[in-house]
Amino acid sequence: MIPIDFFGCKREQIVTCSFEEACDQFPCTGITIPDASALTSLGEALTGTAAFSADPVLSSREPFSELSDYLQAAIRDASVEELKDAGARWAQLLPWEPLDTNAMDLAGFLLHLQSLVRGADREGNRIFLVVESGGLPSS
């Protein structure tokens, strides 16, 4: 299992923070995924394309990565119903499907992820992530 934490803030803010400071200062959510293929299936559930992309944040104090523009837009611009549907699709894909994962749990995570970048006080926020075990798994 791979724990991943997601943060919503501006790039210049994440660069100067430790993991602990980011947890205290920025809206965040997390998920524990069974393996790296869950990230690829997340991309598929959100966009219809089996791709997940996050680039390392250079010169940051921690191994933060920034979610690709394409995935950020898909999350930010989706309606509640679209994110619920994406959660249901994600639950039917590997690696979740054989685990009998509750689709509403995954949809709830996606809705919370959206809340990191959507709202009056969140304009200009980006989605950053850090893998607690040390680095972004390759899929």
Image (cartoon, rainbow, N blue to C red):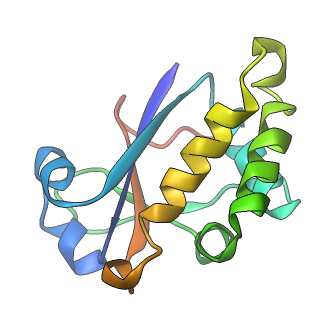
- For residue 137, side relative to residue 39 (left or right): left
Rendered location of residue 61, percent (x, y) = 16, 57
- Compare residues 133 and 10 and report the one nearer the observer: 10
For the C terminus, give its image quadrant.
Answer: top right
Query: Quick one: 88 or 65, which is closer to the camera?
Result: 88
Say which quarter of the image contains residue 98.
Answer: top right
Q: Nearer the viewer, residue 59 or 17?
A: 17
Q: Position of residue 130 (x, y in %)?
A: 37, 46
Q: Is residue 86 above or below residue 104?
A: below
Q: Is residue 16 left or right of residue 133?
A: left
Residue 51 location, x and y as percent? 76, 56
Q: Does the image show residue 4? A: yes
* Total numbered labels: 0
* Image quarter of residue 64: bottom left
Residue at 71% from the left image edge and 56% from the top image edge? 83
Question: In the picture shown, does residue 7 fall above or below 131?
Answer: below
Residue drawn at x 22%, y 51% as measured from the top left: 62
**Image position of 91 (left or right of 10):** right
